[in-house]
Amino acid sequence: MKYKAFIFDLDGTLVNSSLDLANAVNELRIHYKLQELDLKTILSYIGNGASKLVERSFKGTEVDPKKALQLFLNFYEEGIYNETDFYPHVEDFLKELKERQIPAIILTNKPQKMTDILIEKMNAAHYFQYIFGPDKYGKKPDPSGLKKCLELLDLTAKDVLMVGDHHTDIFAANESGVDSVYLTYGFGTTGESKPDYSFDSFKELFRFL
């Protein structure tokens, strides 16, 4: 099936931001005189936005995650593009969408400010018709953001494909009647969600063009 638009998660889907996120978490833990966490543990905490990442990273400690959140964002902003880059084949696919004038949208749980900073540093804004963090329409799995994308594109659910690496992406798609791709190389798990497709490489998306 060919789709008229593609909606993408960001971290773990389009970009591998794992090291920069982990470094920010560990800088924060060092600030509070706590032992650093390993990369695998930190990646397991990603998926519901920065506030949840901080909350999970300090569970069982005396640190107030609400008070620590802004400090985490400061640390992350300082190193947001040190190690982060597109996964293989992502930019090729985005270039093809742009060439064919097929809309591409980012729908991420990453705070809007951090999302905008990263996309600007990557010089990638020209690939996307819209770039949405959770600030306006809520965090996935809440389907509100995905439904807003359909409204803005003036397309039906069956015209669009949601691509992500976490059950939050797939649940949002399931709730919206949108087909979904789960990418196994990312940070998350499918949980109880039901993706229509499961791919090991972004290159497999070319079958939809």
Image (cartoon, helix red, strand yellow):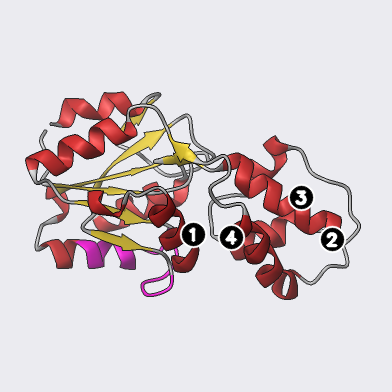
Q: In the image, which is nearer the foreground, mark 1 or mark 2?
A: 2
- Say which of 130 and 209 sits in front: 130
How far apart, in angstroms, are the residues tagged by discs 3 and 1? 18 Å
The residue that mark 1 highlights is 110
Q: How many marks?
A: 4
Residue type at the position of mark 4? Glu
Compare marks 1 and 2 and give the one earlier in the sequence: 2
Q: Is residue 82 visible?
A: yes
- Say which of 98 and 36 sits in front: 98
Compare marks 3 and 2 and give the one earlier in the sequence: 3
User: Disc 2 on helix, strand or loop?
Assistant: helix
The residue that mark 3 highlights is 26
Q: Bounds of the magenta span?
A: 135-149
Residue 171 position (above or below residue 14): below
Q: Are marks 3 and 1 in contact (CB under 8 Å)?
A: no
User: Disc 1 on helix, strand or loop?
Assistant: loop
Residue 204 percent location from the top left of the image: 28, 24
How far apart, in angstroms, are the residues tagged by discs 4 and 2? 16 Å
